[in-house]
Amino acid sequence: MKKVLITGSNGLLGQKLTELLLPRTSVEILATSRGENKLAEILPSLPFRSMDVTDKAQVEKVVSEFRPTHIIHTAAMTNVDQCESDREGALKLNRDAVQYLVDACEKYNVHLIHVSTDFIFDGENGPYDEEAAANPVNFYGETKLMAEEIVKKARCKWAILRTVLVFGVAHDYGRTNIVLWVRDSLQAGKVIKVVNDQFRTPTLAEDLAMGCWLAVEHDAEGIFNISGKEMLTPYDMAMQVAEYFALNKSLIDKADASTFTQPAKRPPRTGFDISKAEKQLGYQPHSFMEGIRMVAEQA
Ligand SMILES: NC(=O)C1=CN([C@@H]2O[C@H](COP(=O)(O)OP(=O)(O)OC[C@H]3O[C@@H](n4cnc5c(N)ncnc54)[C@H](OP(=O)(O)O)[C@@H]3O)[C@@H](O)[C@H]2O)C=CC1
Ligand SMILES: Cc1cn([C@H]2C[C@H](O)[C@@H](COP(=O)(O)OP(=O)(O)O[C@H]3O[C@@H](C)C(=O)[C@@H](O)[C@H]3O)O2)c(=O)[nH]c1=O
């Protein structure tokens, strides 16, 4: 019987993972997150414990008591711009916490599934396969690369699953994402500036959760790219969202790096080649348009 501990269960991926795994009788799960359980009402049977991954003692205590066979580590500081301004916080959460989890996994023989990002790359020549050389262009990417290096040195079994621009609907969730942001802006009649010089393979949160589960089922070891399959610019994405919801495309202003900047630099061309995960894990993501339809059904 596989016993899976999920970190960051209140997050977008954490919630989809919890919803995916809870009904499965072949696996026992323990959802953990820093704050109160945001899924308590909708999933009353969900085993949950509060676990602040930046607290080494809490990590050791929860892992020693639950004794998981696998940990899927989703918790992170994912606000890329915040990572530039709160570097100490970003290091604690995105780097130090991973060392505490590795220590516990080594001590209790737990297989660690660590979620990482395309932002470890500089975006000069995407799409990337699993062997590509990392070269982050912002602090978030630097902290996530540090985390990967900690995982690669671990003496427990480990897998690193890298993903890109995750979108989906979560409960009681503070952050938006590209699909919901475009839909809500256009429905409100707002003009939005959307870049056409950044390239991504956007990932439906449900597909990422399935990718994590496939890695657990296969006891996968090593690095796997788990993202969408289509290389799109945010402008392409916005046009598809407007198409799907029959919204006013003239509200979408084409932008580029000369007219749109954010506090942290974004790697221009990332995106992933997912053929390794397709072949070895049977990973099969939805199309971006199917992902939009699934979002529309939930929000
Ligand atoms: N979103 C994206 O576009 C991408 C994400 N990724 C990676 O995927 C993973 C999941 O991302 P995503 O689901 O979007 O993240 P979210 O920001 O949606 O969720 C992260 C969750 O982690 C929890 N958390 C924060 N601090 C702590 C802590 N100290 N201890 C325990 N839990 C904590 C928070 O829950 P609480 O409310 O309890 O504080 C938060 O909800 C991350 O590792 C990220 O780097 C990679 C590429 C793209
Ligand atoms: C807010 C905004 C974003 N964009 C573009 C920029 C970017 O390419 C895309 C998403 O921008 P955001 O700032 O919302 O997201 P961003 O912080 O770029 O997303 C990143 O999050 C971290 C966690 C990751 O790991 C990365 O894979 C990536 O998903 O949309 C616009 O074109 N116009 C806008 O007004």
Image (cartoon, grey):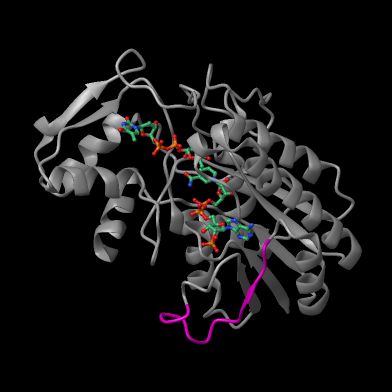
User: Residue placed farthest to the bottom in the image?
Assistant: 45
Q: Main secondary structure of the magenta part?
A: loop
**Taking the image as drawn, is residue 179 in sight?**
yes
- Locate residue 92, reporting x and y percent: 70, 46
**Taking the image as drawn, is residue 289 in sight?**
no
Q: Residue at x 74, y 50 (%)?
A: 98
- Locate residue 280, reporting x and y percent: 65, 49
Within the image, what quadrant is residue 42 found in? bottom left
When the figure is inspected, residue 60 is found, relative to residue 176, above or below; the finding is below
Specify the quadrant that holds the N terminus.
bottom right
Image-based side of 33 in relation to 53, left or right: left
Work out whether residue 158 or residue 30 is closer to the camera in this orientation and state it.
Answer: 30
Q: Residue at x 67, y 36 (%)?
A: 143
Specify the quadrant that holds the C terminus.
bottom left
Answer whether residue 44 is magenta in the image. yes
When the figure is inspected, residue 193 is found, relative to residue 184, above or below; the finding is above
Residues in magenta, as a range:
40-52
Image-based side of 104 in relation to 80, left or right: right
